[in-house]
Amino acid sequence: MPSGSADISSILDRILDAATDNLRIAKILVQMGLDPNNVTYDAIFNRMLEIFVQNITLANLFAAVGAGFFVATLLMRTMVPLRVANMVGCAFFAVFGALSANVSTFLLYLLLLPINALRLRQMLKLVKKARHAAEGDMSIEWLKPFMTERKYRSGDTLFKLGDPAKEMLLTVTGKFLVKEINVEIGPGALMGELGFLTPDNRRTGTIECIEDGQVLTITYDRLLEIYFQDPQFGYYFLVLTSQRLLQNIDRLQKQLANERAATTNRIA
């Protein structure tokens, strides 16, 4: 044996000898099946190996594999593979509970399986919708399950120019007016999405309800959560806001052309 290994082994043995002088540690060693008067590194290693071999059962193997999948979930950055790994881990732990006759463990992980399956299904639907958006489908229907209902009466002001912006709105019924540009917004339109992109999250216009209506809202924090769960949603939102900016530019160009035409007519 190399001298370096012998020195380390002797140092460990001396540390163990000093530790066994403590009565409490001695009791623990006895419970582990070790002789407090003859504790060495090799004795502890052999005892641990013996305990490991004695506890190799089918149930414990399932538990070990399940633990491996749960550790894997901590290393995953996206939700879909995380949910899949969590479901596999739950399945292995449920089998462990059944084989070891541990009813509480079995029921706990059996209950977690459908919960994770439901969340996985919701996430897969979200990913599918986001991919459709990336391919050019501009429907916002897929986002509705993540939104909250809110009602407004005629005359209510939803928000004002320069207000802090914390949410995006989707009109369901009623009519709304963007006061700065005198544009009416009907059902099925998004409002407040540009505030998500401004550096200080401020409203870029004032919107007033001109006909009783209902809207669906989603917070910017929730939008960020969806983005990090599926980065393709970021592409969808980029297309969405770009479309709105192009519409605004087109509207301004038409207004400018009309004003120039009116000026030309007055001069003529």
Image: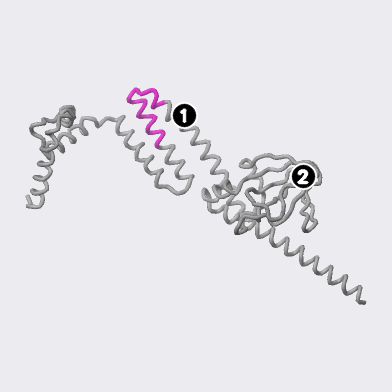
* Residue beneath the point at 11% across and 30% down: 35
Q: Quadrant of residue 153?
A: top right
The label shown at residue 111 is: 1
* Residue beneath the point at 34% across and 40% down: 68
Relative horizontal placement of residue 173, taking residue 122 as reference (left or right):
right
Front residue of 177/124: it is: 177
Secondary structure of residue under mark 1: helix
Does the magenta-highlighted stretch encompass residue 105?
Answer: yes
Secondary structure of residue under mark 2: loop
Residue 115: x %, y % from top left? 50, 33
Of the two numbered discs 2 and 1 in the rendering, the one whose residue sits closer to the viewer: 2
* Residue beneath the point at 25% across and 32% down: 56
Front residue of 3/221: it is: 221
Q: Tell me the crowding category of disc 1: few under 14, some 14 to 19, or many 20 or more residues within 10 angstroms, Cα based.
A: few
Q: Is residue 268 above or below residue 157?
A: below
Residue occupied by mark 2: 156
Mark-to-mark CA distance, 2 and 1: 46 Å
Q: Residue furthest bottom?
A: 268
Q: How many marks?
A: 2
Q: Are marks 2 and 1 in contact (CB under 8 Å)?
A: no
The label shown at residue 253 is: none
The C terminus is located in which quarter?
A: bottom right
Residue 88: x %, y % from top left? 41, 37
Of the image marks 2 and 1, the number of the one nearer the N terminus: 1
Colour setup of the view: one colour
The span shown in magenta is 89-106
Relative horizontal placement of residue 12, taking residue 74 as reference (left or right):
left
